[in-house]
Amino acid sequence: MLVTSRSAAEYHAMFDLSTEELAGARVLDCCAGGSSFTAETPAFVVAADPAYAAGRSVLATAAHQGRVDGDRMIEDHADRFEWTWYGTRSRRTAMRVGAVERFVADLGARPSRYVAAALPDLPFADDSFDLVLCSHLLFTWANQFDQRWHRRAVLEMARVARREVRVFPLVLQGTGEPVPFLSALCEELEAAGHRTEQRKVPYRFQRGAHHMLMVAGSSARM
């Protein structure tokens, strides 16, 4: 069970989020892992991840271990990462440790905001959210999940998103290599009536991972 923890500051940069577009919005973080975005964001946010079926103490341990495993992966591919956004390694570590602590605390205080669920089948009604965010699952693990799975996952997120789906990053984990079926997938989504856009974002860490995929939700379909 891999449970990674990212802060709200990282989310704002990865998804190019503004305070204005989050104001009054209903947001789904899918699959959220140990992210503290739900805990830190004033807007109504629900986090979904299959790992939430485990108990709080198990998740806390897994989140801390996920940070260690992530650091090891970065060391194994050190030439594929840059530190301009974080500034220093210690700042990134502090952000991740803080994210774990906020996640665990909020999980205990507001358990209803954390739903055990996995793509490509979500237990939410159509148009349940204005915005759906997906960090480091799609495309990151394209060496394990094929184009058909990605299509099902994106269409499922678009089903529950009234306004938009945002996915980051668009490269393979570790190596940062391009995803061979990304263009073909976007063509399939466009053919299904979902406008797509690849937008550059402020976040900089994995080399080549500078863009997110934006997919129109139900209210913005072509």
Image: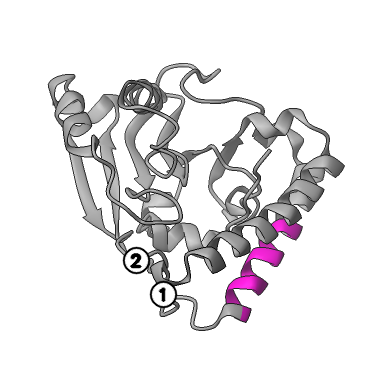
Quadrant, the C terminus: top left
Q: Residue at x 58, y 73 (%)?
A: 92
- Identify the residue at image location x=22%, y=30%: 185
Q: Quadrant of residue 12?
A: bottom left
Label at residue 58: none
Can I make out residue 114 in this image?
yes
Could you say where residue 77 lies in the image, as x and y percent from the top left? 47, 65
State the residue lying farthest toward the bottom: 88
Residue under label 1, please give it.
82
Q: Which residue is mark 2?
A: 207
Residue at left 77%, top 43%? 59
Question: Residue 100 magenta-drawn?
Answer: yes
Query: What amino acid is at disc 2?
Result: Arg
Q: Residue 39: x and y, percent? A: 65, 52
In this rendering, the answer to whether 212 lies above or below 122 is: below
* Rendered position, 55 above or below 36: above
Quadrant hosting residue 114? top right
Q: Residue furthest right?
A: 57
- Give the image location of residue 171, x and y in percent: 34, 50
Q: Which residues are magenta?
A: 90-101
**Residue at screen point 48% across, 39% down:** 27
Horizontal arrangement in the rendering, residue 27 relative to residue 20 (left or right): right
**Could you say which is closer to the camera, residue 156 or residue 173?**
173
Callout 1 crowding tier (Cα within 10 Å): few <14, some 14–19, many ≥20: some
Q: Evaluate if marks 1 and 2 touch, with contact meaning CB atoms under 8 Å apart.
A: yes
Q: Quadrant of the N terminus?
A: top right
